[in-house]
Image: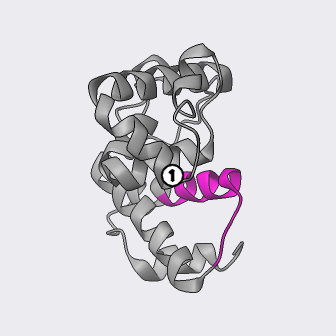
């Protein structure tokens, strides 16, 4: 990954993420009810996305638990070619997300979704730009700063 910093339009990211989630739900119709049940939400909880409601952290958490962390990582990935970057390495990203989730669960701690997203991005940048493999020690050292 290059050291060149890029700017991503947040609204564009949210719109693209909503489209991806809607497409996933259309492909896996039977799981939409399952997603809603997991969090005790009404059956229209995910259906609201089709009417312009933004994707939130609860949507993403349910998707991660039902479809798996790799599918969630794929949903969150962007095509960075417009910004001069290569594609996201889903293997590194999924390992980072899994490591963050496992640490927080084991420590019985929670962090705000924005903080978690920043941590994942920071850790991803570190592991993607070095030869260091994704590891628990580094993930824990970053998380101890905020959790």
Q: Is residue 82 above or below residue 139?
A: above
Task: Kindly identify which residue carries mark 1.
Answer: 61
Picture coordinates of residue 129 (x, y %)?
41, 54
| Residue 80 in sight here | no
Where is residue 122, by image quadrant?
A: bottom right
Identify the image quadrant of the C terminus: bottom right
Please count the marks in the image.
1
Which residue lies at the image location 61% right of the left edge and 46% below the top edge?
57
Query: 40 or 116, which lies in front?
Result: 40
Region rendered in magenta: 109-123
128 in magenta: no
Query: 3 or 51, which lies in front?
Result: 51
Identify the image quadrant of the N terminus: top left
SS of the residue under disc 1: helix
Picture coordinates of residue 114 (x, y %)?
69, 50
Horizontal side of residue 143 vs 32, given as left or right: right
Horizontal side of residue 3 vs 26, given as left or right: right
Q: Main secondary structure of the magenta part?
A: helix
| Residue 104 in sight here | yes
Picture coordinates of residue 33 (x, y %)?
41, 39
Query: 123 or 68, which lies in front?
Result: 68
Horizontal side of residue 112 vs 69, given as left or right: right
Picture coordinates of residue 27 (x, y %)?
27, 25
Circle 1 crowding by C-alpha within 10 Å: few under 14, some 14–19, many from 20 = some
Q: Is residue 66 above or below residue 16?
A: below
Which residue lies at the image location 31% right of the left edge and 69% below the top edge?
133
Which residue lies at the image location 54% right of the left edge and 51% below the top edge?
121
Which residue lies at the image location 66% right of the left edge and 21% below the top edge?
11
């Amino acid at each position: 990954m290059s050291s060149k910093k890029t700017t991503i339009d947040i609204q564009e990211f949210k719109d693209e993420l909503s489209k991806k989630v809607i497409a996933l739900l259309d492909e896996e119709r039977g799981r939409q009810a399952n997603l809603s049940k997991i969090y005790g939400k009404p059956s229209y909880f995910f259906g609201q996305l089709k009417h312009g409601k933004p994707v939130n952290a609860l949507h993403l958490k349910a998707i991660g638990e039902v479809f798996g962390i790799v599918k969630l990582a794929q949903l969150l990935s962007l095509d960075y070619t417009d910004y001069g970057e290569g594609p996201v390495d889903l293997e590194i990203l999924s390992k980072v997300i899994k490591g963050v989730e496992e640490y927080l669960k084991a420590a019985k701690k929670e962090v705000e979704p924005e903080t978690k997203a920043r941590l994942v991005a920071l850790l991803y940048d570190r592991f993607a730009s070095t030869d260091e493999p994704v590891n628990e020690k580094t993930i824990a050292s970053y998380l101890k700063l905020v959790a």
